[in-house]
Amino acid sequence: MKGKKGNKHEGKPDGRVGRLDESTIGYYRRVSDALKEGFEEEEHRSVFLKNVFNELKDKELEISRNQTASHILEDLLQYADASQIEEFINGITKDLETAVHDRFACHVVQTALSKAGNFIQSGENRSALSELILKISKTFLEFVEDVVMDTYASHVFKTIIEVLSGVKVTEEVSRSRLSRSQQRGKSVEATTDKTGQEQLPEEFAEYLNEFISKIKELPNLSELLLHPVASTVLEALLLVLHSTDETKCQKLSKVVLKRCSNVLQKTESPTQDSKPPLLMVDTIGSHLLEILIRVSSEKEFRKLYKKHFAGCLAPIMLHTIANHIVQTILQKVSTEEQLEMIFDEMYNHFEDLLAVNHIQVLQRLAEACVRVGIKQNEFIEGLLIAFHCYDPKSKQTSCVTLLCSLKTYDVYYGANEEETPKPVVSLPFNIQGSLLLQQMFKFKNCKTIISSFLAVSPDDLVAMACNSCGSHIIDAFLQCAVVGEKKREQFVQKLQGNFMKLCCDKNGSRTIDTMWKFANLKIKFIIIEELAPKDRLLQSDRYGRFIFKNLAVDLFKKKKNEWKELQNREIRKQRMLKELVSDSVEVKEKDGQEEVRKEELITTDASDQIGEIFDGIAKKKKTKSKVLDEEDVLEPKKKKKKK
């Protein structure tokens, strides 16, 4: 099994490996169609699977090497029982070397092994399947150095690690670097999903430890750190150990970091134009370094940051590839001391980050400020300076508009020196700017952002509500903890005359729904009074009909008093639920006697079950306070016509 690759001209006279005749490939296509259509009875499916696996017997490897048939087999194995999986693995691993080095068969082997791991954990055919896994693991153990660097066998190796540990690494992490790079616009999260429930055989842990020892002792480990295939194996192993054995994970991390010290050497006196270390700027090594940061303990993270990052963040966060490492560091930060150190180093480079379009770094910094709870005012101040709208103070009212478009004040308004300058371009919405604003609305003190938001013109607010990025900014404003009823009412009044337009728009209708959830009776009355005369148009629209139903427009037109009672009841339920949950509840744990404070903000509608609970509470307990003043707001009185 030493680095063997599938030979194009091997085994077939026409020079194509895995080629099947038309009747065979037609049979497996019909199998695929039958699986997609499903079966009316379980018995029919069992008979069908039994027949297919009988047909497949002794031809597992041959069929698996065909591109079309291999995908069908991967789907078929999901329906197989434990005995069928055992028989299939026995068949395909008769020539294990060919199976794991073939570009299509290796994925079929992966699926079969993963399914076998699930059965082992559930206790089905445990003994026989465990023996198979151990047999394959023993073979891989002899050729670790070659397997980790092989494009196809490495996938099978990662699956074996998962089965031995009982931990499933997410597909985005286990996928090859080339495959990940093809997923443009999608963030790759290094997470693990524990699938094991029962204790695994002791031999599994022994073999896993042997694999770890073999990898640590590899003479070319430093080269593997930058290898496009081997690095993904190391990442998977680190994540598995992070979930199963933290001590071993930290030991492996130390070995890896020690081996890569020559490509992670920090510049002695770095400047903004200094080049970051090789491991940080390499597309392969940087991703491995991100994983090392994520799995590091609190103590090791402090050491790692102090040794390799402190004092030289500027060139790293401005680099095209290395900036992702800074994002990972910011996600890892958990203490005030760490955040203060990092924030102070980044503060003077906000505008530089905007210039190179590394807005995600600022997003991660904003998230850290929310999570740790410090440096929020300084963050807003630094951002206003970066957008050239900090001084004079009158410019600060335009910060939301500038963040939406990710343009500085000079670019957006041009050289206009008027007291109320007009933009030289229409308001565009940038997804990164939208995400940044959403984080800033979570700050404890975001009065500057709120004032700027309310200063946006009605036309721009309508455009924002009807935009897929902008509508989420409005959601964040409405959910903001420091936004009171008066501010919400002020916002709704600015949209008056445009509610119908919003209701008939895909994103605008979402905005109306969110406004309704957070509205008091006065605000609800403003909205529905404008929509009620246009009920027919509302019902005929694909989006408006949902608003018609959610707002109970028909009930409002026919029985206003009943509509008002319904809204009062819903407001009362939400208010009571909020009061119950927002009270600090102290729970003493039996073992540690620790006190836990639970505070939540209820922003969603009360369900029917919650309604029943509150109806029961209302009968037992009479509330002294009356309904909010807004609940008593009546519709405007019409003037009596003179006789």
Image (tube, rainbow, N blue to C red):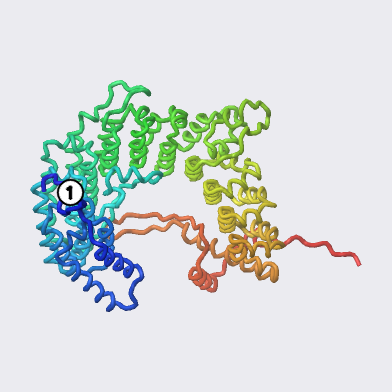
- Residue positioned 63% across, 40% down in the render: 455
Q: Which image quarter: residue 228?
A: top left
The percent position of residue 355, horizontal first and vertical second, equals 46, 29
The front one of 403 and 643 is 403
| Type of amino acid at the residue the image marks with label 1 | His
Q: Quadrant of the C terminus?
A: bottom right
Q: Secondary structure at mark 1?
A: loop
Residue 188 shown left or right of residue 49 in the figure: right
Residue furthest out toward the front = 13
Residue furthest out toward the top = 269
Residue that carries the numbered disc 1 in the rendered image: 9
Is any part of residue 219 visible from this angle? yes
- Residue positioned 58% across, 49% down in the render: 465
- Residue positioned 66% across, 45% down in the render: 458
The percent position of residue 333, horizontal first and vertical second, equals 34, 40
The percent position of residue 215, horizontal first and vertical second, equals 14, 43
